[in-house]
């Protein structure tokens, strides 16, 4: 792959000029037509029966056009487990659940009318801790769980709050522990977090008189929105059009479908009008997916030489009130439950449990941050117990070519050792810095791995239209939420098509015009969409050669295309411009040869399998991406403040399609990880979310962003486009454990949870004394 | 019903006279009445900086100010930063350094950076951190933003 022209170069972002000039169109920037504004009435109890909803006063309020409740619109929706309705029907399951929606001519009128709706509840005992929720006498949150439609790779337990129990049984766990010289066992806890993209969730819908539904949405996947709406509303897909704009950050919270369908019955009453909903910050934090909290027990058996012989992992996830999406996070964490390590004997039980907390769902990392927190902390404890270097323990057990995952999948394309070593070298691993001015210094390292958690049939497709002048349009269904997809995908198209990247146009999707894409999630687009685009480009290039061969009356094999002209290597006189080939090519006699060139390509994984329901064995990973984080900290024992002195991150990108954007992703993920490690925790009091704004829920700002050193490792992914694999989520995974390991190293105290707030660190120091 | 007031102001170099609803925030006025949608809303309560504009050259959160306060003032929004199709050097530096991802915080970020550079043509890292600490970027482009702001200074 030595002679790549575009892939591997840092061309500027396709969306650059638009984004620095304010002309990039986000959904709320579009003028769509005459508007009605929607606002939700939210539940004031976490678990309760709805006795009565009185909408009479709201309906009479000036400017109000319609009020809708769950009784009138009980349609269900869900990605993997159809457990959700757009509006609560009969009962509410979390604080802030929408119970009614108002549409009015102004936002203000809608908000006023919401206050006029009166709802009577009969409060029910709630479940706020999933460990309690698993007990036989726990209040049941979804009485109908056994009757919900579900993708048959999930295992709900009838008559309980367990929405999925995923099992791994690899090797012989008893034998593994018997072989061990030492057994280490700890509990860990990871709290909920929120994605807080700076752009909140927004959607608008329009119903036209011919029965066509148009949806504008901040959703990460227009195709999934269309698919779920088609099912929920029992409509054919060609009657639903979902339009994407630029998305102001997703990080998982805009995956699947949620708010779009809420507005449909109102739109149907007012054909031609646009009914729009815009979540404010509080609604966004409280009413959309949160990262599921994880309570876990991890037990590891290890030989004196550091080799791990057995791992037993019990994970209890707080799925929240609805787990239509969360069941798959629990599954992914289960089949990946050895993290970046090759462990022969594994027993894992991963439970998704309903509670009356906010809805759990996907967040950057998809369970890996939470699950690998335990792994990477425990490795530290193992190293200490054995008196070994934590890096050494990681290198001994780390996955190598031919290693197997918890699910028994064999891994091929990786250099995890290198990922670890580059960050260790950078932070001066092994050199203990003395404490200064009464402040303690420490170093920590953590590894990471993740594969896309997607169904084995999650597909992608692409079309490339060659214009009459030899420029091209790439059409795909992936969304642009900052990750740089438009740029990377056009680079792949350019590489395969030989047309320069600045002669290629690419846009965000519109399901009426762009071909199918499952979802822009799971760090999969570069690989999946990239592969289909590469195939579409090769298809178009093949057509270019075929047409040119006909025109020049020379064998196709002799032809080359340099982006401007097709020419024969054997006879320099035989040349045709791309314009001649692309513009409805005809011979000098006037006889036509070919019409416009359209390339097509599609992709579906062929290396994935179902997993055995009892043992969890099989191939769930499309590809595995490894990396590592290294940190040096300074801790002030007086205040408990953790200062980051050095932060190094590495990722094995296979091939960085655009090194600058790849680095930006690496930094962005690392900062999000740092933010969760030090600041972020959603707090609940009996289901009531307490921190619902940026003052109470702090995220990293520029003034607490340390300098980062980043390393892109490139071990080609055999089946990835030009060797590339996705890296968007991964960098976040190792940061929290690396920081905790460093703080531990500095203070000699352990942390089984984060964020490492000054209060928590100070308390830990105090407890030690 | 809704009370309005006539105000006079300059927006991106053009003099304007317009009615503003009393009680409407400057942010809403800019987006809904002036149709300058480059200015973004991320929180409405002064916590995120997505809505930063320059008022008489100073960066302000437009969600915290009323539209009527624009009377007699000079407003610069992101749309007014490039001149005759030529990008401001901060905008160029943001592109060169990939200092944005989703781009939603970017207009506010660029204007806050512009204001800093106008005040301090050669800011230190600390100056940049301080000036931009009210602008949240969830995509985490902070390191690139810092580099971009410094590069704009050096090119002066
Ligand atoms: S919208 Fe003004 S500071 Fe967030
Ligand atoms: S670029 Fe996305 S929030 Fe800053």
Image (spheres, coloured by chain):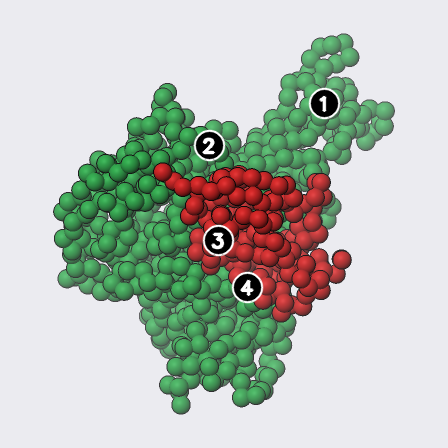
Chain colours: A green, B red
Toward which corner of the image does residue A177 lie, by quadrant?
bottom left
Residue assigned mark 3: B65
For disc 2, the neighbor class at 10 Å (few under 14, some 14 to 19, many from 20) is: some
Are circles 1 and 4 on residues that touch, CB within 8 Å? no
Q: Tell me the element at label 1.
A: helix
For disc 3, the neighbor class at 10 Å (few under 14, some 14 to 19, many from 20) is: some
Q: Residue at x 57, y 36 (%)?
A: A507
Q: Are marks 3 and 1 on the same chain?
A: no
Gap between marks 4 and 3 measured at Cα? 19 Å
Read off the chain for label 2.
A
For disc 1, the neighbor class at 10 Å (few under 14, some 14 to 19, many from 20) is: many
Q: Say which of marks 1 and 2 sits in front.
A: 2
Of labels 4 and 3, earlier in sequence is 3
Q: Are marks 4 and 2 on the same chain?
A: no
Q: Residue at x 18, y 42 (%)?
A: A54
How far across and how far down the image is residue A398, in percent? 51, 67
How far across and how far down the image is residue A559, in percent? 76, 29
Residue assigned mark 1: A581
Gap between marks 1 and 2 measured at Cα? 39 Å
Q: Tell me the element at label 4.
A: loop
Gap between marks 3 and 2 measured at Cα? 27 Å
**Residue A54 appears in the figure:** yes
Instruction: Using residue A500 as the reference point, say whether residue B30 is left or right of it.
Output: left
Instruction: Using residue A142 as the reference point, say whether residue A677 is left or right of it.
Output: right
Are circles 4 and 2 on residues that touch, CB within 8 Å? no
Q: Tell me the element at label 2.
A: loop
Q: Are marks 4 and 3 on the same chain?
A: yes
Instruction: Using residue A547 as the reference point, say whether residue A463 is left or right of it.
Output: left
């Amino acid at each position: 792959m030595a002679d790549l022209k575009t892939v591997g170069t840092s061309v500027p972002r396709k969306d650059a000029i638009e984004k620095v000039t304010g002309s990039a169109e986000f959904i709320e920037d579009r003028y769509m037509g005459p508007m009605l504004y929607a606002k939700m009435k939210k539940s004031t109890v976490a678990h309760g029966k709805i006795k009565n909803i009185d909408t009479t006063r709201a309906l009479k309020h000036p400017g109000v056009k319609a009020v809708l409740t769950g009784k009138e619109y009980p349609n269900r929706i869900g990605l993997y487990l159809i457990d959700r309705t757009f509006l609560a029907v009969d009962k509410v399951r979390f604080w802030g659940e929408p119970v009614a929606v108002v549409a009015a001519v102004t936002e203000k009128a809608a908000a006023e009318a919401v206050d006029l709706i009166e709802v009577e509840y009969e409060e029910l005992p709630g479940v706020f801790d999933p460990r309690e929720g698993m007990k036989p006498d726990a209040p049941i949150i979804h009485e109908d769980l056994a009757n919900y439609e579900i993708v048959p790779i999930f295992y709900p337990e009838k008559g309980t709050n367990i929405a999925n129990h995923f099992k791994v049984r690899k090797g012989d766990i008893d034998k593994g522990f018997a072989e061990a010289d030492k057994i280490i066992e700890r509990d860990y806890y990871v709290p909920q977090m929120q994605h807080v993209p700076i752009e909140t969730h927004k959607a608008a819908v329009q119903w036209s008189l011919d029965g066509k539904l148009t949806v504008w949405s901040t959703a990460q996947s227009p195709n999934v929105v269309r698919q779920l709406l088609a099912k929920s509303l029992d409509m054919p897909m060609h009657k639903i059009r979902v339009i994407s704009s630029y998305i102001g950050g997703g990080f998982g919270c805009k995956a699947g479908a949620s708010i779009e369908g809420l507005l449909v019955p109102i739109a149907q009453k007012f054909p031609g009008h646009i009914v729009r909903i815009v979540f404010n910050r509080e609604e966004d934090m409280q009413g959309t997916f949160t990262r599921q909290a994880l309570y876990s027990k991890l037990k590891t058996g290890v030989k004196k030489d550091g080799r791990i012989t057995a791992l037993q992992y019990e994970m209890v996830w707080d799925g929240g009130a609805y787990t239509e999406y969360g069941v798959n996070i629990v599954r992914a964490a289960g089949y990946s439950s050895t993290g970046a390590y090759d462990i022969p004997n594994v027993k894992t039980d991963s439970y998704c449990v309903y509670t009356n907390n906010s809805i759990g769902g996907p967040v950057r990392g998809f369970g890996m941050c939470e699950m690998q927190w335990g792994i990477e902390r425990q490795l530290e404890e193992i190293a200490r117990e054995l008196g070994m270097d934590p890096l050494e323990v990681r290198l001994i057990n780390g996955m190598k070519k031919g290693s197997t995952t918890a699910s028994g999948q064999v891994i091929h394309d990786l250099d995890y050792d290198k990922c670890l070593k580059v960050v260790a070298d950078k932070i001066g691993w092994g050199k203990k810095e003395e404490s200064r001015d009464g402040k303690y210094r420490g170093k920590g390292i953590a590894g990471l791995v993740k594969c896309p958690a997607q169904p084995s049939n999650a597909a992608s497709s692409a079309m490339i239209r060659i214009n009459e002048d030899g420029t091209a349009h790439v059409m795909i269904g992936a969304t642009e939420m900052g990750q740089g997809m438009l740029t990377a995908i056009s680079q792949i198209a350019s590489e395969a098509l030989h047309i320069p990247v600045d002669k290629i146009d690419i846009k965000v999707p519109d399901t009426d015009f762009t071909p199918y894409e499952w979802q822009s999630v799971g760090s999969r687009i570069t690989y999946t969409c990239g592969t289909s685009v590469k195939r579409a480009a090769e298809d178009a290039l093949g057509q270019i050669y075929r047409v040119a061969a006909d025109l020049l009356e020379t064998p196709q094999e002799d032809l080359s295309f340099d982006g401007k002209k097709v020419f024969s290597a054997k006879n320099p006189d035989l040349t045709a411009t791309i314009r001649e080939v692309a513009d409805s090519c005809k011979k000098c006699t006037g006889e036509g040869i070919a019409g416009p060139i359209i390339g097509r390509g599609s992709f579906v994984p062929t290396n994935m399998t179902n997993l055995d329901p009892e043992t969890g064995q099989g191939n769930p990973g499309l590809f595995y991406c490894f990396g590592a984080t290294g940190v040096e900290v300074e801790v002030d024992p007086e205040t408990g403040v953790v200062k980051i002195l050095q932060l190094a991150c590495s990722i094995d990108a296979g091939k960085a399609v655009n090194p600058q954007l790849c680095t930006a992703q690496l930094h962005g993920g690392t900062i999000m990880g740092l933010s969760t490690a030090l600041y972020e925790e959603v707090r609940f009091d009996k289901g009531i979310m307490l921190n619902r704004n940026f003052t109470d829920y702090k995220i990293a700002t520029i003034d607490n962003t340390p300098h980062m050193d980043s390393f892109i490792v490139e071990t080609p992914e055999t089946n990835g486009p030009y060797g590339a694999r996705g890296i968007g989520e991964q960098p976040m995974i190792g940061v929290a454990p690396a920081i905790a390991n460093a703080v531990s190293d500095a203070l000699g105290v352990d942390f089984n949870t984060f964020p490492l707030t000054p209060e928590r660190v100070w308390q830990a120091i105090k407890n030690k004394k | 019903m809704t009370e309005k007031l006539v105000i006079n102001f300059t927006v991106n170099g053009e003099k304007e006279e317009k009615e503003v609803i009393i009680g409407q925030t400057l942010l809403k006025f800019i987006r809904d009445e002036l149709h300058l949608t480059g200015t973004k809303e991320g929180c409405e309560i002064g916590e995120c900086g997505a809505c930063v504009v320059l008022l008489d050259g100073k960066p302000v959160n437009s969600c915290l100010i009323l539209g009527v306060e624009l009377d007699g003032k000079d407003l610069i929004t992101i749309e007014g930063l490039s001149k005759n199709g030529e990008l401001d050097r901060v905008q160029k530096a943001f592109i060169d350094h990939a200092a944005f991802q989703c781009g939603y915080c970017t207009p506010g970020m660029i204007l806050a950076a512009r204001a800093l550079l106008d005040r301090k043509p050669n800011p230190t890292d600390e100056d940049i951190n301080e000036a931009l600490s009210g602008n949240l970027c969830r995509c985490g482009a902070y390191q690139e933003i810092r580099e971009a702001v410094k590069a704009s200074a050096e090119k002066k």
